[in-house]
Amino acid sequence: MTQEELSFEGAMQQLETIVEKLEEGDVPLEKAIQYYQEGMKYSKICSDKLANVEKQMTQIMNEQGETKPFMIQEEE
């Protein structure tokens, strides 16, 4: 499956599985390095997908059909 085909949720699930395996602690060094490399790949996929969504959400349409900057209002 390519990076484009893998959903954010799918990449996160793969990353969580790898983290669980590494946290078990009884993984041989060579396998741990392999898991770490795979985890970094899935982490980058998630990061790239979040950055893409952030770009898409930077502007939204208002009720008049005009685009305006998207601002997240934080709760106080």
Image (tube, rainbow, N blue to C red):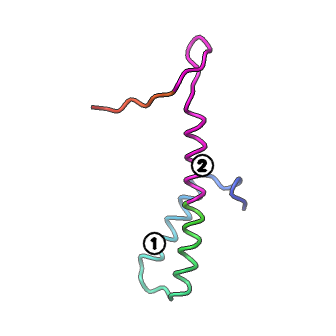
Choose mark 2 or mark 1, whichever is in front. 2
Looking at this rendering, what residue extends furthest in the left direction?
A: 76
Q: What amino acid type is highlighted by mark number 2?
A: Lys
Q: Quadrant of the C terminus?
A: top left
Looking at this rendering, what residue extends furthest in the top direction?
A: 64
Q: Quadrant of the N terminus?
A: bottom right
Q: Residue 40 carries which label?
A: none
Q: Where is residue 30 in the image (x, y as percent from the top left)?
A: 55, 87
Question: What residue would you read off at disc 1?
Answer: 20
- Kindly indicate whether the residue at mark 1 contacts the one at mark 2 (C-beta within 8 angstroms): no
Label 1: how many Cα within 10 Å (few below 14, some 14–19, many 20+): few
| 57 in relation to 17, above or below | above
- Residue at 55% in and 39% down: 54
Helix, strand or loop for disc 2: helix
| Magenta stretch encompasses residue 28 | no
Q: Position of residue 56 (x, y in %)?
A: 60, 35
| 63 in relation to 56, above or below | above
| Magenta stretch encompasses residue 62 | yes
Q: What amino acid type is highlighted by mark number 1?
A: Glu
Helix, strand or loop for disc 1: helix
Q: Earlier in the sequence, mark 2 or mark 1?
A: 1
Distance (Cα) linking label 2 and label 1: 23 Å
| Residue bounds of the magenta highlight | 44-69
Choose top left, top right, bottom left or bottom right for residue 61.
Answer: top right
| 7 in relation to 36, above or below | above
Name the side, left or right, on which 2 lies relative to 16: right
Q: Residue 49 carries which label?
A: 2
Label 2: how many Cα within 10 Å (few below 14, some 14–19, many 20+): some
- Residue at 55% in and 68% down: 39
Q: Position of residue 21 (x, y in %)?
A: 48, 76
Query: Which of the two residues, 24 or 32, is positioned nearer the viewer here?
Result: 32
Choose top left, top right, bottom left or bottom right for residue 31.
Answer: bottom right
